Image (cartoon, rainbow, N blue to C red):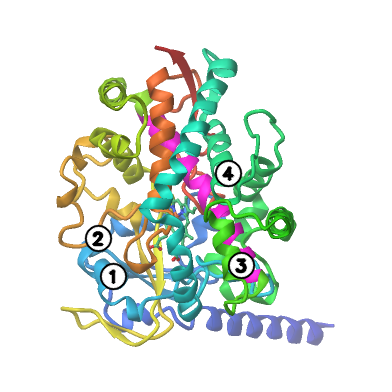
């Protein structure tokens, strides 16, 4: 018996030793290159606080960002070394100037899912280039102008909804209200479908949208896994969004396309018309459907998140809210309502939203994969093909150097937008370079028109459960407020 246990424990110790050696095999990577790095923990690298849900990935990388003044530093995502860039100039080289060496994202989704893996967001270089060129015409100025009446119509519905159901009610979950508006918008402008989110609390589009981004354990596994365990994601066929939800969306979009095909209908070149035109252009049906699903997944939550964070800051800063309302009212009077050229002239609105996006960017960090051996300009640093590079959006947008007193909500920082990012990229709420958010102008238009509707009719105020300071939800890959954004809408 003694011999058995001795052999057993010996084998156990050797196995543990070999596994330990394996998972820590890369841990001298940054030390060997004489690059400042954060000391890793076996098995987790530097991500233990994220896996134990003690903090968010954005807060964690920002915390690391603050520990050095160097232009870049190293971390470990499990056993993989990842370079984090702090210098705006190097960030600009990666995202724009030397895009040819950084054209892919690291984030992945299982290639067993033909819809998600074909989305522009996840596409790798050659396919990305083709699809991006096909989708760009959806967002020309002419197309955006044509979408404005629909957006105004939905912003009126948003006003009526607040007027009829929410006025004076304490602790209204503002992200949900904005989510109804943004879901209606995407469904109408992209698919020509009336999602009826204001009329029906259980509207199908809204239910799907909530399930995609709700902060559940399974979504945390999908979203964090897609970022940090690309290998496992593929081996186990785990997709970024649950297969059931993808199937539901696929069926809605398929039926819209079929109806249009049968009736030979063209709704004036909306997304569905553009996608129908792609048929036969070397694109499979799944590739086409993927782009439609993506517009929904990427569009509604980003819009409602930006709107609700902006409203939170306006509730906390009544003087800024008053100043903004005055500018909105003057603009509406001068233009007899919301017009395409008119709303774009409300400079203070743009400044307020920029400041909200600085404090609450949708993605807390940007990432690229190095696709060919690359030497960083002005340094000895060479990164190899396959190396992951992160840019800490949170770190830079809360850096005293670029934004003094960063916790303060101060739209005046954006008074002269030409000064921002002049020498390099440190304000990147929509990303930058050729992979910049394709929906950024549409997203901003939706946010602005929605805010104009709300602020011209209501005062947004704090309620009993409104937090003094927003904290972020560790289970979410996107920047989301833990505990939501409870506010109150009051009459003017
Ligand atoms: C306020 C609203 C929005 C914000 C803050 C936002 C933010 C972002 C960010 C940070 C990225 C990553 C860019 C990079 O890596 O450089 C991105 C990519 C993307 N966004 Fe948005 N987004 C918004 C609205 C939208 C909307 C409305 C749509 C679609 C209708 C959309 C579709 C996309 C797509 C398809 C990509 C991937 C682009 C590519 O890889 O070429 N976004 N967005």
Magenta stretch prevailing secondary structure: helix
Tell me whether circle 2 and circle 1 mark residues in contact (CB < 8 Å).
Answer: yes
Residue with the mark numbered 3? 288
Rendered image quadrant of residue 289: bottom right
Please give the name of the residue rendered at 85% of the width and 83% of the height, measured from the top-left corner: 1
Image quarter hosting the C terminus: top left
Q: Position of residue 329 (x, y in %)?
A: 30, 21
Residue labelled 3 has its Cβ within 8 Å of some atom of ligand 1: no
Q: What element carries label 1?
A: helix
Report crowding for label 4: few under 14, some 14 to 19, many 20 or more residues within 10 A (C-alpha): some
* Residue mark closest to the camera, 4 vs 1: 4
| Quadrant of the picture in which ligand 1 is shown | bottom left
Residue with the mark numbered 2? 425
Separation of residues labelled 2 and 1 (CA atoms): 10 Å
- Lower sequence index among marks 4 and 2: 4
Q: Residue 474 carries which label?
A: none
Q: What element carries label 4?
A: helix
- Lower sequence index among marks 4 and 1: 1
Residue with the mark numbered 4? 188
Separation of residues labelled 4 and 2 (CA atoms): 34 Å
Rendered image quadrant of residue 376: bottom left
Separation of residues labelled 4 and 3 (CA atoms): 18 Å
Within the magenta stretch, is there residue 269?
no
* Residue mark closest to the camera, 4 vs 2: 4
- Lower sequence index among marks 4 and 3: 4
Q: Where is residue 207 in the image (x, y as percent from the top left)?
A: 69, 42
213 up-or-down from 61: above or below: above
Rendered image quadrant of residue 9: bottom right
Q: Position of residue 43 (x, y in %)?
A: 55, 71
Residue with the mark numbered 1? 96
Can residue 382 be spotted in the picture?
yes
């Amino acid at each position: 018996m003694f011999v058995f246990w001795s052999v057993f424990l010996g084998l156990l110790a050797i196995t543990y030793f070999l596994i330990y050696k394996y998972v820590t095999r890369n841990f001298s990577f940054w030390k060997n290159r004489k690059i400042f790095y954060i000391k890793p923990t076996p098995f987790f690298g530097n991500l233990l606080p994220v896996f134990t849900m003690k903090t968010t990935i954005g807060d964690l990388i920002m915390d690391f960002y603050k520990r050095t003044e160097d232009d870049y530093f190293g971390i470990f995502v499990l056993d993989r070394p990842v370079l984090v860039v702090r210098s705006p100039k190097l960030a600009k080289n990666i995202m724009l100037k030397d895009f040819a060496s950084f054209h892919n994202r690291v984030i992945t989704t299982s290639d067993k899912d033909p819809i998600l893996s074909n989305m522009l967001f996840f596409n790798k270089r050659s396919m990305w280039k083709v699809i991006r060129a096909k989708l760009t015409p959806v967002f020309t100025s002419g197309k955006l102008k044509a979408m404005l009446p629909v957006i105004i119509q939905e912003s009126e519905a948003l006003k009526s909804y607040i007027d009829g159901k929410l006025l004076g009610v304490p602790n209204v979950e503002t992200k949900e209200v904005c989510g109804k508006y943004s879901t209606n918008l995407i469904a109408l402008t992209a698919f020509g479908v009336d999602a009826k989110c204001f009329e029906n609390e259980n509207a199908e589009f809204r239910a799907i949208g909530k399930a995609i981004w709700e902060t559940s354990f399974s979504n945390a596994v999908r979203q964090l896994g897609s970022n940090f365990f690309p290998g496992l994601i593929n081996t186990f066929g785990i997709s970024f969004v649950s297969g059931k939800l993808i199937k539901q969306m696929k069926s809605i979009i398929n039926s819209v396309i079929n109806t249009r095909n049968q009736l030979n209908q063209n709704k004036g070149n909306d997304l569905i018309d553009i996608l129908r035109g792609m048929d036969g252009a070397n694109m499979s049906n799944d590739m086409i459907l993927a782009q439609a699903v993506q517009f929904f997944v990427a569009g509604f939550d980003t819009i409602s998140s930006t709107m609700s964070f902006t409203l939170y800051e306006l509730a906390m800063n009544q003087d800024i809210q008053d100043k903004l309302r005055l500018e909105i009212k003057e603009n509406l009077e001068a233009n007899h309502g919301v017009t395409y050229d008119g709303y774009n002239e409300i400079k203070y609105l743009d400044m307020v939203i920029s400041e909200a996006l600085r404090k609450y960017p949708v993605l807390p960090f940007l990432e690229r994969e190095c696709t060919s051996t690359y030497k960083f300009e002005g340094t000895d640093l060479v990164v190899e093909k396959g190396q992951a590079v992160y840019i800490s959006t949170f770190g830079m947008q809360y850096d005293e150097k670029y934004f003094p007193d960063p916790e303060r909500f101060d739209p005046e920082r954006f008074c002269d937008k030409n000064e921002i990012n002049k020498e390099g990229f440190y304000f990147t709420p929509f990303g930058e370079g050729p992979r910049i958010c394709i929906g950024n102008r549409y997203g901003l238009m939706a946010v602005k028109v929605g805010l104009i509707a709300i602020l011209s009719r209501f005062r947004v105020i704090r309620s009993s459960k409104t937090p003094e300071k927003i904290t972020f939800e560790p289970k979410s890959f996107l920047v989301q407020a833990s505990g939501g954004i409870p506010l109150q809408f009051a009459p003017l």
